[in-house]
Amino acid sequence: MILSPSEIERYSRQMLITGWGIEGQEKLKKAKVAIVGIGGLGCLSSLYLAAAGIGKIILIDREKFELNNLNRQILCWVKDIGRPKAEVAKEKLLAFNPEIEIIAFNTEISKENIDKIIGKVDVIVDGLDNWKTRFMINEYCVSNKIPFVHAGVTEMHGQITTIVPGKGPCLRCIFPKTPREMRYFPIVGATPALLASLQVMETIKLITGIGQPLIGRILFMDGKEVNAEVIKIEKMANCPVCGESR
């Protein structure tokens, strides 16, 4: 994967980062990243992954944009209301960076179609708002040894962790009991923006090898009090997904 002159100019500032350079940028260009859910998290993470030069981005979401999405889902403009989220996001991202590849799936991901839709990717990014699908993605990632960058948000709070099968706990280790689902939850747009930005950093670190991802650690952010806490987490020996007895 050779960078074009325009790519070298576009990414020149990030290539100045120690350990990044041309080699790191070429790793990003070769990379395939899937984003499941193009909501508050997915809109921001897809935009900044496109900005960073991820070569192939897969967008997955079955829903259409609604007016109440616009306080946080920044790839939607008023004229896009009623259109499929993945389709709109693809158009905006390609207009922003035409030198990357975007694939959009306007469908609900399931155990039956996940392998066909996602296949072999380098990282899966969590843009979801429900735990049932998160845990399904977690199982797929563990089975296929794919890193999974999880984030969840509500109000002015959020959490993020990076799951790398074989190197740390999976999502079920962290949440042995499924959290309560909420159809409509309170949220301000800056919250998913903050957590999505961290998801992008985690994804870039996984691909380039720069820095220390949040493996075996979970970061909790509290925007109301403006504080953060990192908690170490251990793999459960009896985890039904990644445990030794599985």
Image: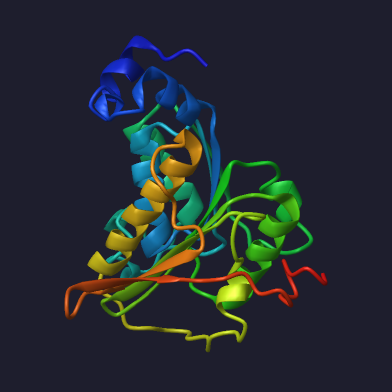
Q: Is residue 53 above or below residue 48?
A: above
Spot occupied by residue 236 in the image (x, y as percentages of width and height): 66, 74
Q: Residue at 36% of width from left, 57% of height from top?
A: 196
Colour basis: rainbow
Quarter that holds the C terminus: bottom right
The residue at 35%/28% (across/down) is 19
Tell me, yes or no, if residue 80 can be seen here. Answer: no
Image quadrant assignment for residue 18: top left
Residue 83: image x %, image y %? 45, 57
For the view shown, which residue lies furthest in the right direction? 245
Instruction: Give the residue at x 61% y 55%.
Output: 167
Is residue 4 placed above or below 141 in the rendered structure?
A: above
Residue 181 shows in this picture: yes
Q: Is residue 100 left or right of residue 222?
A: right
- Residue 34 appears left or right of 185: right
Front in this rendered view, residue 44 or 73 = 44
Counting labels gives: 0
Side (left or right) of 237 relative to 193: right
Could you say where residue 122 lies in the image, as x and y percent from the top left? Answer: 59, 41
Image location of residue 54, percent across then percent down: 45, 34
Q: Is residue 83 above or below residue 201?
A: below
